Image (tube, rainbow, N blue to C red):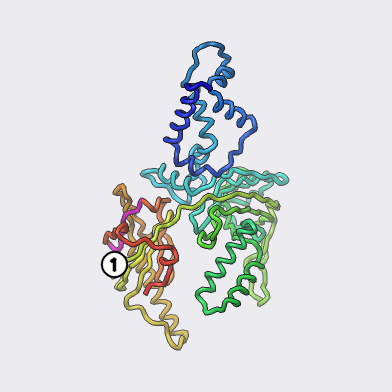
């Protein structure tokens, strides 16, 4: 290779690194599903661009078009590392996660960073399952997949209730054991247990079935013979100590419908009726699709605040804030909170829980929105969320990069985050005093 050839090759690679550095860095560990011919052609081009172009163009001794070489080199180099950006489909695969109407490319970029392009298919009989992609925020894993079959009954439409008792996500066995052990130890830490009791609890947890979820409420969409699903299951990153990219298998088997009352209630050992059993099995399977998640965009937790507000005539103090890709969370105290009744008679406990619920409603109502580093304000009042005593979370209307959030709106007061202390997740989750 001549010096000019080497300089050209280096220039092409440097230009691509400059423009697509983030994507290349993200995709380093990903494997490209390409043909052997693709790899041979890529190696020939990168080894000797001049000779490759002469062979492909049939040129002998003529002036070469270096612009053509640059374009083809860029395509070959980037095809191995820019799959997610090239598809631009995360916001289409996961529409319920929302899109920023002012900057849809930002929503796509955030989902791309925390997402995994899979596009893996398996066919059993006349049915094909295609797993499009996964998104993991460190707390939940979202899956987008389709099921295509000419045998789907006509009455199986979007949101038709489904029995999916034989469907589950399976962690790689060593990762499952790691996950279960840490999950159990965390649960035991809040109780006064001896080391021997903790170890016994861990052994019992490891004896359980390797299973993450899952319950499919129904397809999100049906078009022709294709059902589209968007499922999410709990998968907490903090319960991994060694694993950063969990390996999961989506197992689908014996999906049945309850349509027209075909399912029957299941009576448990206590004589109580539980969820209906399966009716007509419409997707027997089994299907097993294995994939590896990319690392999530971690939430950022802030502490050291002291913001007092009265909402719904309830005085509140907010002292910690969390910003994740999908929500704003707060830790708070109700300043005149009632004590747990002693003795805990039913009437007193009902009043206590009612007061706790009123405090939670007030705390969630206090979190009105947030500001980002470009000066934009995002209103989140009235959006869904969750909470418990001293903890509240409000969902964002679309995915955000936590590092871009500069302040939160607490009952009309702008609370700057960047002057606060950065906390660990464990410290953030501790009960507020």
Tell me where the magenta segment starts and ends, as one range: 404-411
Q: Position of residue 291 (x, y in %)?
A: 60, 49
The image quadrant that residue 242 belongs to is bottom right
Q: Which residue is mark 1?
A: 307
Q: Dot 1: within a 10 Å radius of its alpha carbon, few (fewer than 14), some, or many (20 or more) residues?
A: some
User: Does residue 153 appear left or right of residue 190 in this picture?
Assistant: right
Residue located at (67% from left, 72% from top): 267
Between residue 368 and residue 81, name the one nearer to us: 81
* Residue 226 visible (yes or no): yes
Name the residue at the left extreme. Answer: 413
Q: Position of residue 184 (x, y in %)?
A: 57, 69
User: In the structure shown, which secondary structural element does the residue marked by tag 1 occupy?
Assistant: strand
Between residue 236 and residue 17, name the one nearer to us: 17
* Residue 234 visible (yes or no): no
Quadrant of image for the C terminus: bottom left
Badge count: 1
Name the residue at the right extreme. Answer: 125
Name the residue at the top extreme. Answer: 61
Residue located at (36% from left, 44% from top): 102
Q: Position of residue 86 (x, y in %)?
A: 50, 37
On screen, 189 above or below 65? below
State the predominant SS element of the stretch in magenta.
strand
User: Does residue 81 appear left or right of residue 250 in this picture?
Assistant: left
The image quadrant that residue 150 belongs to is top right
Residue located at (57% from left, 21% from top): 52
């Amino acid at each position: 290779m001549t010096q000019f050839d080497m300089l050209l090759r280096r220039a092409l690679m440097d230009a691509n690194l400059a423009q697509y550095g983030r994507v290349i860095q993200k995709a380093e560990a990903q494997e490209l599903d390409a043909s052997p011919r693709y790899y041979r052609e890529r190696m020939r081009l990168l080894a000797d661009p001049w000779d490759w172009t002469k062979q492909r163009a049939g040129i002998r001794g003529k002036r070469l078009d270096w612009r053509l070489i640059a374009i083809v080199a860029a395509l070959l180099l980037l095809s191995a590392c820019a799959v997610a950006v090239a598809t631009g489909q995360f916001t289409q695969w996961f529409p319920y996660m929302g899109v920023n109407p002012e900057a849809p490319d930002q929503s796509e970029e955030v989902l791309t960073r925390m997402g995994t392009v899979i596009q893996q298919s398996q066919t059993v009989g006349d049915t094909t399952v295609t797993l499009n992609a996964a998104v993991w925020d460190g707390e939940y894993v979202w899956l987008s997949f389709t099921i295509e079959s000419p045998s789907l009954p006509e009455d199986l439409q979007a949101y038709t209730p489904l029995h999916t008792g034989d469907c589950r996500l399976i962690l790689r066995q060593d990762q499952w054991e790691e996950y279960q052990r840490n999950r159990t130890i965390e649960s035991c830490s809040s109780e006064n247990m001896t080391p021997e009791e903790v170890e016994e609890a861990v052994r019992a947890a490891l004896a359980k079935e390797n299973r993450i979820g899952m319950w499919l409420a129904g397809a999100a969409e049906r078009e022709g013979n294709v059902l589209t699903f968007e499922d999410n299951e709990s998968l907490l990153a903090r319960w991994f100590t060694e694993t950063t990219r969990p390996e999961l298998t989506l197992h689908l088997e014996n999906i049945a419908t309850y349509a027209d009352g075909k399912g029957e209630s299941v009576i448990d050992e206590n004589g109580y009726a539980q969820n209906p059993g399966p009716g007509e099995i419409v997707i027997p399977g089994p299907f097993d699709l294995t994939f590896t998640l990319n690392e999530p965009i971690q939430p950022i937790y802030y502490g050291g605040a002291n913001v007092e507000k009265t909402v719904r005539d309830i005085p509140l103090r907010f002292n910690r804030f969390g910003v994740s890709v999908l929500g704003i969370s707060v830790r708070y105290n109700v300043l005149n909170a009632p004590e747990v009744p002693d003795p805990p008679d039913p009437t007193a406990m009902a009043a206590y829980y009612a007061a706790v619920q009123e405090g939670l409603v007030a705390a969630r109502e206090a979190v009105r929105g947030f500001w980002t580093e470009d000066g934009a304000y995002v209103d989140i009042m009235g959006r869904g969320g969750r909470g418990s005593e001293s903890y509240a979370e409000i969902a964002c209307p679309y995915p955000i990069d936590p590092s871009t959030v500069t302040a939160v709106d607490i009952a009309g007061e702008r609370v700057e985050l960047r002057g606060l202390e950065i906390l660990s997740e464990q410290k953030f989750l501790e009960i507020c005093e």
